[in-house]
Image (cartoon, helix red, strand yellow):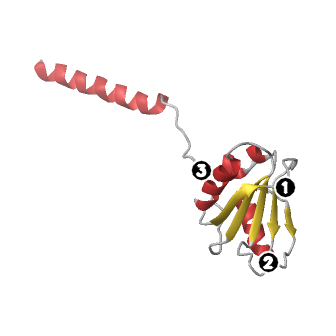
Amino acid sequence: MKWLWVLGCLIIAGLVFATKAFWEPQTAPDVVPEAPQVSHNIRVEILNGCGTGGIATEVGQKLRDFGIDVMTLGNAENFNFPETIVIDRLGKIEYAKQVADVLGTPNVIQQKTPDPFRIEEVTVIIGRDYRRLEIFK
């Protein structure tokens, strides 16, 4: 008689375990998008073009996390930039495009500066659209 009671308990425990596995919602594994790749340590200048305090520093840290060499932080000539732009300074447009891919902005322009002392290959001017950049998502 005692073995019947033990068998009944085992059957009930098995049923509880089996139904729990079927009734709990299954969640899909999180899919993490692959981060854009940067070919080498691109030297970048970041300028605040929107007027939000500390934004150049914040963007600079996020770009450093991608292996980008942030050399200079500062303010743009004004705070009237509606969109973030990435500027190729030394004729290496592919570097500017890589930085733009990390940021998630299509705005890339080439503006070579005949300055023999310039070490930054790319300038990023952060615009008022910065909240929509990929690095803030």
Badge 2, how many Cα within 10 Å: few under 14, some, many 20+? Answer: some
Residue type, mark 2 in image: Leu
Of residues 9 and 79, the one drawn nearer to the viewer in this rendering: 79
Query: Foreground: 124 or 48?
Result: 48
Tag 1 near tag 2, CB within 8 Å: no
Side of 8 relative to 64 (left or right): left
The tag earlier along the polypeptide, 2 or 3, is 3
Neighbour tally class for label 1: few under 14, some 14-19, many 20 plus, Cα within 10 Å:
few
Element type where label 2 sits in the image:
loop
For the residues carrying marks 1 and 2, which lies nearer the camera in this image? 1
In the rendered structure, which disc, 3 or 1, sits on the residue that comes first in sequence?
Answer: 3
User: Residue 110, how many percent across, how many down?
Assistant: 87, 71
Q: Is residue 4 above or below residue 106?
A: above
What secondary structure is found at the residue carrying circle 1?
loop
* Nearer mark to the viewer, of 3 and 1: 1
> Residue beneath label 3, please?
31
- Residue 61 percent location from the top left of the image: 60, 55
The earlier-in-sequence mark between 1 and 2 is 1
Image quadrant holding the N terminus, namely top left
- Judge left or right: residue 136 versus residue 126: left
Task: Please state which amino acid type lies under the numbered disc 3.
Answer: Val
- Residue 77 is tagged as 1
Q: CA distance from mark 3 to mark 1?
A: 40 Å
Circle count: 3
Q: Is residue 75 left or right of residue 1?
A: right
Q: Position of residue 117 (x, y in %)?
A: 74, 78
Look at mark 2 in the image and give the residue it sits on: 90
Q: Position of residue 5 (x, y in %)?
A: 18, 19
Q: CA distance from mark 2 to mark 3?
A: 37 Å
Query: What residue sits 21% from the left and 25% below the top?
Result: 7
